[in-house]
């Protein structure tokens, strides 16, 4: 398995880039590439009602999901909130149900990685 940290993959140079890279890599079936968008100890609120913790576990989860060849459509990001090296990104799903939100952190090389990922939540 290639090491996502030393890969020559495109990096997210601004927080909103992560959403685009996620869609591109997921649609290519690239679980390693999706995992490379997360910090080593990131927390993903998925599967529904659960959490997946750490890049290795996130990679395994996405390998399982992507084995079914789902198609992801780009979603227009909402304005990003930035405070120093942290940012909050979000997108509204195209079907209008709920929202998606991520906390990302600027890395020493200036790129951004996900720390917390809430891929979907709905309003009561």
Image (spheres, helix red, strand yellow):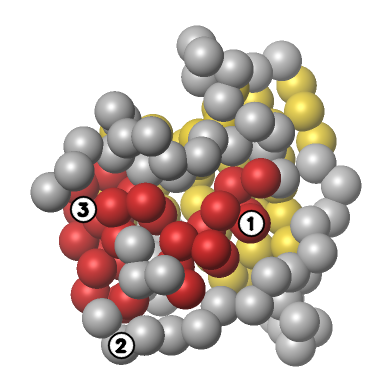
The answer to whether residue 114 is above or below residue 52 is: above
Q: Position of residue 54 (x, y in %)?
A: 27, 43
Give the farthest residue toward the right. 79
**Disc 1: which residue:** 20
Q: Residues within 10 Å of mark 3 (few under 14, many from 20)?
A: some
Seen from this angle, which residue lies furthest left?
A: 1
Q: Which mark is residue 8?
A: none
Give percent across and percent down for residue 16: 71, 45
Q: Nearer the viewer, mark 2 or mark 3?
A: 2
Q: Residue 68: which numbered mark, if any? A: 2
Which residue lies at the image location 65% right of the left edge and 31% below the top edge? 13
Regarding residue 39, the answer to whether it shows in the image is yes
Q: Position of residue 3 (x, y in %)?
A: 21, 37
Quarter-wise, where is residue 82 in the image?
Answer: top right
Residue 12 x, y percent position in the rendering: 59, 37
| The label number, if any, that marks residue 57 in the structure image | 3
Check the image and name the residue furthest to the top: 108
Residue 25 versus residue 8 in the image, above or below? below
The answer to whether the residues at label 1 and label 3 have Cβ atoms under 8 Å apart is no
Label 1 vs label 3: CA separation?
A: 22 Å
Task: Give the quarter of the figure containing the C terminus.
Answer: bottom right
N-term-proximal mark, 1 vs 3:
1
Separation of marks 2 and 3 at Cα, in angstroms: 18 Å
Gap between marks 1 and 2, in whole Å? 20 Å
Residue located 36% across and 85% down the image: 69
């Amino acid at each position: 398995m290639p090491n996502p940290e030393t890969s020559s993959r495109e990096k997210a140079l601004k927080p909103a880039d992560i959403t685009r890279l996620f869609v591109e890599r997921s649609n290519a079936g690239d679980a390693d590439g999706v995992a490379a968008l997360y910090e080593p100890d990131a927390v993903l609120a998925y599967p529904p009602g659960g959490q997946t913790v750490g890049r290795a576990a996130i990679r395994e989860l996405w390998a399982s999901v992507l084995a079914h060849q789902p198609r992801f459509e780009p979603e227009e990001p909402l304005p990003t909130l930035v405070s120093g090296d942290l940012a909050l990104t979000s997108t509204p799903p195209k079907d209008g149900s709920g929202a998606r939100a991520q906390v990302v952190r600027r890395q020493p090389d200036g790129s951004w990685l996900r720390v917390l990922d809430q891929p979907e939540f709905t309003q009561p």
